[in-house]
Structures are given as structure tokens and as C-alpha cells.
Image (cartoon, rainbow, N blue to C red):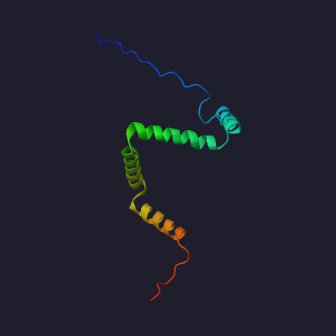
Amino acid sequence: MKDKVEVTTAPRKRGPVAGTEEARRGGEAVRAKYGRDFYSRIGKKGGDTVRRQHGPDFYANIGRKGGESTKARQGNEFYARIGQKGGKSKRGPKQEPQA
């Protein structure tokens, strides 16, 4: 006879479900109370905490994994295409080299 496995669920987070009208109104209330800059400050705090807990290599690893995933999904041509777009936007009109 097999033992029963007890399944427990994580306690539900407080507040409205993400993506709902209630969540949108809550976000607007926070923005009105603390200002737009508040989101940048709490994001920086979170990033600093992650860097302290996991080290700077953590960001390199997730960037590499994201790049591999994009390459698998989009193909090599994608990087060539966005590289050309980026190069064109950074430069002014193409000029002939001066001799």
C-alpha cells in the first residue's frame, strides 16, 4: 500500500491578481503617492540584493542563456539584421574615407 502524499500550496500573495483592473488601479495609486522614480529605486534595491546574493557572474549567465534562447528561436540572421539596424542608427550618413 502506498503512503499518501500531502500536497500543500504556497500561501497566496496579498493584493490583487496581476493584470487585473484592481492591480492597475493599485499601481496608479502607488505612482501618485510615491512618484515615478519610486519604481527605479525599488528596482535598483532588488538588483543590488540579487548581485549580493548570487554574485555578478549571475547576470552574465542569465544574459548568455537569454542570448542562446534568442539564437535558437530567431536564428543567426536575426543578429545580423539587428546589428545592421543598430549600426545605421548610431552613425550619421555614410561618408567616404578621406585619402
Whether residue 45 sits left or right of residue 32 in the image: it is left
* Image-based side of 77 in relation to 91, left or right: left
**Quarter of the figure that contains the C terminus:** bottom left
Tell me residue 31's x, y (percent).
67, 39
Nearest to the observer: residue 51 or residue 14: 51
Give the side of residue 23 with respect to residue 9, left or right. right
Across and down, in percent, residue 26 comes to: 67, 33
Q: At 39% across and 15% down in the image, what residue appears?
A: 6
The N terminus sits in image quarter? top left
Q: Quadrant of residue 37?
A: top right
Q: Is residue 70 above or below residue 23?
A: below
Tell me residue 23's x, y (percent).
64, 33
Q: Outermost residue, bottom direction? A: 99
Give x and y (percent) for residue 9. Answer: 46, 21
**Up/down of 57 relative to 16, above or below:** below
Compare residues 47 and 29 and report the one nearer the observer: 47
Which residue is depicted at the point 65% across and 36% down? 27
Query: Number of numbered discs present?
Result: 0
| Residue at 50% in and 38% down | 46
Query: Farthest top residue?
Result: 1
